[in-house]
Amino acid sequence: MGIMTRMLRLCKADVHGVMDQLEDKGLLLKQYLREMEDSLENKERQLHGMTRNAEQLQRQFLRHGEEMEKLEADLNLALSKEKDDIARMLIRRRRCLETACRCLKDQHEAATQERSQLSATLADQRLQYETLKARADAYCRQADQRLWAEESGVRTGERGPIDPKEEDVELELLQRKEALQKGGHA
């Protein structure tokens, strides 16, 4: 049973090795970068939504504050005219608005804090993305250069188009000497 298990592991390892060589790492890097960029764009949309929500909460808070000021003026008028029934109704409305203002203020503070945290996270992730993108671009450039070198037959330490043959160097040296002698005597 142990031999069969080991043979199965060897086959799996060999298949994984073949798959790794078939995958183009540059393409995978580019795909991962696209996915990261999509994720960042989603978070930016979420951040804009949070900003709009916080602004809406702030506007509601201000409207309630203005309404409370009007109620306060009406309440003072009702008290001065000794209209207790109207004053009671205005007090009830004012208290409801005070409660609503406290809730809006709490919601606004929570939304602002959540927005700040997401903004900081987004800034960090954007920096990580830009760093990774630069590194991936450098990797892809190096991979392209290696591929070009392999396709053109240039290998380090081997004679290729970059290392001319000794015969070619000697021939050019003789041609230049001859041209120099003809040019010097003419």
Image (cartoon, grey):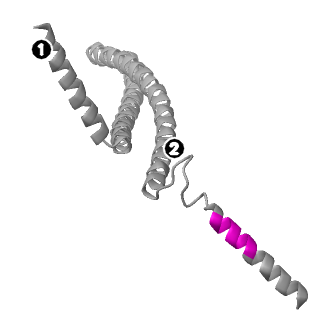
The residue depicted at 24 percent of the width and 24 percent of the height is 13
Q: Earlier in the sequence, mark 2 or mark 1?
A: 1
Please name the residue that numbered disc 1 is placed on: 4
Stretch in magenta: 167-174
The answer to which image quadrant residue 24 occupies is: top left
The residue depicted at 64 percent of the width and 66 percent of the height is 167
Please name the residue that numbered disc 2 is placed on: 138
- Frontmost residue, 9 versus 92: 9
Q: Amino acid at mark 1?
A: Met
Mark 1 neighbour density, 10 Å: few (under 14) some (14–19) many (20 or more): few
Find out whether the residues at labels 2 and 1 contact each other: C-beta distance under 8 Å: no
Looking at the rendered image, the quarter that the N terminus falls into is top left
Q: Residue furthest right?
A: 185
Say whether residue 115 is magenta. Answer: no
Q: Is residue 138 left or right of residue 93?
A: right
Where residue 63 appears, as percent x and y from the top left, is 38, 31
- Frontmost residue, 145 versus 127: 145
Where residue 80 appears, as percent x and y from the top left, is 40, 17
- Frontmost residue, 89 versus 32: 32
Let me know if residue 81 appears in the view: no
The residue depicted at 37 percent of the width and 28 percent of the height is 57
The answer to which image quadrant residue 2 occupies is: top left
Where residue 26 appears, as percent x and y from the top left, is 38, 44
The residue depicted at 37 percent of the width and 26 percent of the height is 64
Where residue 160 appears, as percent x and y from the top left, is 54, 57
